[in-house]
Image (cartoon, coloured by chain):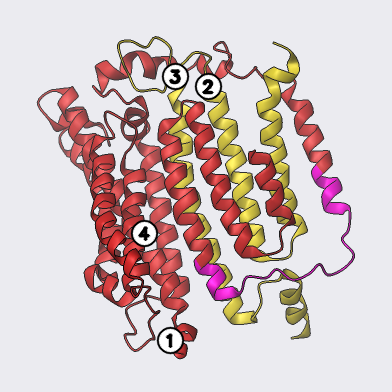
Amino acid sequence: MSTTLGLYNYWIVIFLMMVGFYVVIAHGNLIKKVVGLNIFQTSVFILYITMGKVDGGAAPILDDAVTAYSNPLPHVLILTAIVVGVATTALALALIVRIKEAYGTVEEEEIHSQDESL
Amino acid sequence: MLAVTALSVVFLRDLFTTVMLFGIYSLLSAGFFVTMDAVDVALTEASVGAGVTTMLMLGTLALTGRKEKAHRKPTSMLPLAVVTVTGLVLIYGTLDMPFLGDPDAPVHQHVAPRYIEQSYEEIGMPNIVTSVLASYRGFDTLGEVVVIFTAGLGVLTLLGLSGDSPHRARPVAMGHHLVLRVIARALIPLILLYALYIQFHGDYGPGGGFQAGVIFGAAIILYTLLFGLTKAERVITPVFLRYMMAAGVLIYGGTGVLSLLLGGEFLNYNVLAHDPLHGQHYGIIAVEFGVGVTVTAVIISIFFNFTGRGSQPQEEKQ
């Protein structure tokens, strides 16, 4: 297998990760930032899951007819990470709602300028 | 395809579309997880990413407005440059990585073979993911449940405890759509049933407490959307939810303490019954149940709090 074919999964992960990173640092809107953070997070999930893949392997549910399984350990880690991810996202969104109530905006720059004018 | 969706998220200024696209993105990645043999993960991602996260983000948008402000200063190239450089460095790093699907990759050499070969004898469950989640790595999972519980507490603190102020205006339900109402009446029991199936069938097929909790929560959220927060809170009161959040963690921890009292280590289920296999089975069911209860309660109470916030302007229209 050539290098390009064997490693393209990592490159997609990196691409997604960088897209998420770009959204986080380049956008001023807080909700957009949370979406970017979530994209970043998903790229990490994909990284783990692709690492667990074995050629010709089946889903890790034991069956007599199957000889090769994919690695169950990354699945476990990511499974819990997803649910923890939604909980922390909810917390971030709750903070945004409070910021909106306090400042009347969710744009980072406007929040800064309001802080300075105090 | 994932990459294209992610890119469009960057360029769209309308936050509503962004959030919807993000839901699609999650669903796509769930499909991708299935092709990567990670069925448990796919199930979670589909219910969490495409369902609950999208719902919460929409709830936030309703409170904060859907338009992103046009770009302020002339867009600097700095972020783009930083991102490109980091990306290139990371790609350089991958050149040493094992190829996709290579069975000889270092990840597959340690720990995992043991789980695959011996978990059936030690735990007695076909679904390795469940065995690892609830038994081998029980400590991890306990920690994660506590994190979820804490996040739930955080949202409660930030957005106020809904239900404490009954005079607060309530959002209007969509109950006047007859078709929606009839279909939802038929669907909600099925969703609840499916959640229970996922909860208790997690030992044999994909599923478990996390997924079941999210699906159960989604059913209640659907009910709330259609019949209004007031009615939903009459069915499941916020106080009850708060107790349930704690109860789930306690069930999990309690199982651990019980195994301590019976002479094993913390979360060693072997001692829970007359022989280790049954003990493991009981232990895992109890622990998964605890997980399910906490996740359900946290998701529903987070949603209640978000909708409880956004109520005033809608009520004024009436």
The disc, 3 or 1, on the residue closer to the chain's N-terminal end is: 3
Label 4, secondary structure: give it: helix
* Up/down of B283 relative to A109, above or below: above
Q: Which is nearer the eye, B57 or B114?
A: B57
Residue of label 3: B112
Q: Colour of chain B?
A: red
Q: Position of residue B106 (x, y in %)?
A: 57, 16
Mark-to-mark CA distance, 3 and 1: 55 Å
- Residue positioned 41% across, 53% down in the render: B148
Label 1, secondary structure: give it: helix
Q: Position of residue B299 (x, y in %)?
A: 38, 58
Residue B82 part of the magenta segment: yes
Mark-to-mark CA distance, 1 and 4: 26 Å
- Is the residue marked by circle 2 packed among few (<14), some (14-19), or many (20+) residues within 10 Å? many
Of the residues shown, which amino acid type is indicated by label 3? Ala
Mark-to-mark CA distance, 2 and 1: 52 Å
Residue mark closest to the camera, 2 vs 3: 2
Q: Which circle marks residue B240 in the picture?
A: none
Q: Which circle marks residue B315 in the picture?
A: 1
Residue of label 2: A53
- Residue positioned 71% across, 75% down in the render: A111
